[in-house]
Amino acid sequence: MCTLTIAWRTFDDAPVAVAANRDEAIGRASSPPDVYREDPLVIAPRDERAGGTWIGYNERGVFAGVTNLWTDADLAGERSRGLLVVDALETSSAAEAAERVERTTEEFEYDGFFLVVADAADAICFRWDGALERTEFEPGVHVVVNVAVDDDARIPSHRADVARRQAENARAVRRALEPEADGSAHEWLDRVGDVLGDHDYGVCVHGDGFGTRSSSLIALGEASPGDDERGRDPAVRHEYADGPPCVTPYERVDVESQL
């Protein structure tokens, strides 16, 4: 995934609202969001090559999403980054997920990534380029791309021109997604879905054998279920475009019949 936007503790109807485009090789097989795991309940798409995922959430209202990080560092990539997302989604809170990420990156080396974990209490963005950096998000709208988190852009030398354009695109996206007074997560997701498919913002990608493969809109409610409510889908909205959002409509993800 190459563009991830999150509105954290911005809207009363959903403390975690996320919209994200996944950019990937056209031939890399994946499956749309479904019940990824039952205990704890995890809702996520699946990367059929490595078995992990790039975005998802669990029954406790914990969200996790990853983007590639462009870096000049030479990394071994011992383990799929998508499996680190799965690790995070096995936890009961974003704070616990963050601890899991910190432990696991001491054990394995990964290709470069940004990883966001969030729930109603915490939102944390990790940057990995062989060393792990942790940023605590403040309430508001944040945008993560391959070279930047909000205004913190770090341009790798090996693709500097493209990286600078991407950082500028991310700033434009963030400006466009500033929350409106008395707005709701649903209204914001409608707006961000349009932005993610608008080529003027440069985040819906079409290349030779590579491009935007899918897009997700997710809003998670406030309450985490108690032990007597295990297995409940906490999303107040979850839609998925199984293709570039410029031409592919978002469709509701419904897993209730499987629960």
Image (cartoon, rainbow, N blue to C red):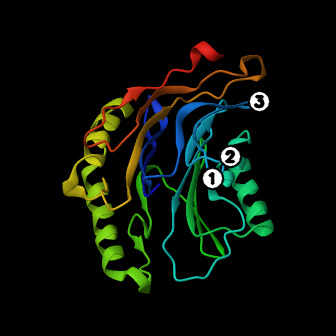
Residue drawn where x is 31% and y is 56% of the image: 205
* Neighbourhood count class around disc 2 (C-alpha, 10 Å): few under 14, some 14–19, many 20 upward: many
| Residue at far top of view | 257
Q: Which residue is mark 3?
A: 39
Residue type at the position of mark 3: Asp
SS category of the residue bearing label 1: helix
Are the two marked residues, 1 and 2, in contact with CB atoms closer than 8 angstroms? yes
Picture coordinates of residue 207 (x, y %)?
31, 61
SS category of the residue bearing label 2: helix
Q: Quadrant of the C terminus?
A: top right
Q: Which residue is mark 1?
A: 82
Residue type at the position of mark 2: Val
Q: CA distance from mark 1 to mark 3?
A: 18 Å
Residue drawn where x is 47% and y is 54% of the image: 1
Residue 254 placement, left or right of 84: left
Residue 107 or residue 172, whichever sits in front: 107
Disc with the residue nearer the chain's start (1 vs 3): 3
Q: CA distance from mark 3 to mark 2?
A: 12 Å
In the rendered view, tell whether residue 194 sits above or below residue 112: above
Are the two marked residues, 1 and 3, in contact with CB atoms closer than 8 angstroms? no
Residue 240 or residue 211, whichever sits in front: 211
Q: Which residue is mark 2?
A: 86
